[in-house]
Image (cartoon, rainbow, N blue to C red):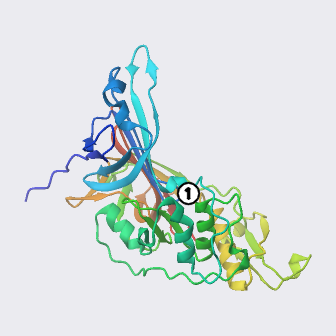
Amino acid sequence: MVNALRPRDTVNVELEASLSLPGGGAFDNFTTLEVVNNITGPSEASFESGDDISWAAIGDVFAIGTKMKVFVNDRLRITGRVELNNAPFDPHAGAVIRFAVRTKLADAFVAGANPSTAVQNVSIKDFIVKLYEPMGYVAADFVFDPRTYRNLMTGLAKHTSEVPVDLEPIKLPEARVTPPETIYAAADRHLRRHGLMHWDMPDGRIMVGAPNDTQDPTYTFNAFRSYPSAEINNILGASRTRDWSGIPGRLTVFGVGGKRDFTKTRVSDTASDDDVLAAGFYRPVQIVAEGIRSKALALSAAQRELSARSKRKDGYQINLDGLSHWVDGKQVQYSPDTVALIHSDVAGGTSDPYYVQSVVLTRSAAEGDTTQMDLVKRGIWRL
């Protein structure tokens, strides 16, 4: 039986037709690249290309606003437009062109939300669509099944127990937009009350869902120090961080009902970190949130806030060879919102699932093709 050879990773850029390039075009002549996918911010890709005659030859092609699609191994990774370009000059190295492509979602992190966006008698879904409408989004641009995102990114048609999210009508009078709240922040505020987030998809649509760290692992990574275990290593390097700085032992959210003395309200609940308490740290935290009107919402808010402060409790940053995962003769693309099983005897050892929250693909003349992942141990990320 002949083992399949691992194919070379490829990156290609397609350019939409423009005044400088009427028929559109393709581009793969770059010396360095970095492609970033992260569920907490807009995806982006940055490139460096050329020599001292580059600007005259291709400078106009990468004008600000030029629309592009970035493909990795023939799978669409980012749909965006050029937001940055520059041409640094060095007497010894000449001049190069650098440009960065970011998704349209980047506008939502800057643009203020419309304060007149209706919040009465509308669903959260309708509210979000209305928030994004000025940016050109329509209802069909929002996807509420997280499996769609992972299937597009990884190339795997994995079936999980998830179901598309169902967003209830808005009921709170505090729901309205308050300047200078951005479009992204206004949408995120409502979604997080339901344990949800939103991030961009490779085709330009917006994914609405919850980070799922309970799914079956998509990747398996091994890092052992000695043979024979080290024969299966597939990690170039790793850093495991367990940073408990700033993690509360107990976090209490107080809602409405206590007049001036918020401690007398019946609308409150507490989330605890038993590990922090057992280690002897004294870190009680109290938060007053007038928009919380039930104990269930108070508990949800407390758990969400505790999770937000615990992201570094146990995590990995790992470096991998190549831009894709090669296992059993099959090429699988790297993606956020997946789970990786890490086997290691370093730093106390582990054989646990970790949630992938960001992926950075890099190509350079010095390092070749590499991937960096940020991962958080299962159970820490909770909305």
Q: Depth check: give the residue in front, 33 or 13.
A: 13
Instruction: Tell me the residue at 29%/67% (across/down).
Output: 156
Secondary structure of the residue carrying tag 1 is helix
State whether residue 269 appears in this view.
yes
Left or right for 206, reference 197 = left
Measuring from the top left, give residue 79's x and y in whole percent: 38, 54
Left or right for 294, reference 121 = right
Quadrant of the rendered structure where residue 342 is? bottom left
Left or right for 26, reference 84 = left
Q: Residues within 10 Å of mark 1 (few under 14, many from 20)?
A: some
Q: Residue furthest right?
A: 260
> In the rendered view, would you say 143 is above or below 323?
below
Where, quadrant-wise, is the C terminus in this rendering? bottom right
> In the rendered view, would you say 323 is above or below 353?
above
Identify the residue position indicated by label 1 in the image: 108
Q: Residue furthest left?
A: 1
> In the rendered view, would you say 305 is above or below 2?
below
Measuring from the top left, give residue 160's x and y in whole percent: 37, 78
Quadrant of the rendered structure where residue 217 is? bottom left
Left or right for 288, reference 61 = right
Q: Depth check: give the residue in front, 82 or 300.
A: 82
Measuring from the top left, give residue 17's x and y in whole percent: 30, 46
Instruction: Tell me the residue at 40%/63% (across/down).
Output: 340
Instruction: Tell me the residue at 74%/76% (across/down).
Output: 291
Q: Depth check: give the residue in front, 209 or 215.
A: 209
State whether residue 373 appears in this view.
no
Where, quadrant-wise, is the N terminus in this rendering? bottom left
Measuring from the top left, give residue 147's x and y in whole percent: 38, 72
Q: Residue furthest top?
A: 91
- How many marks on residues? 1
Q: Amino acid at mark 1?
A: Ala
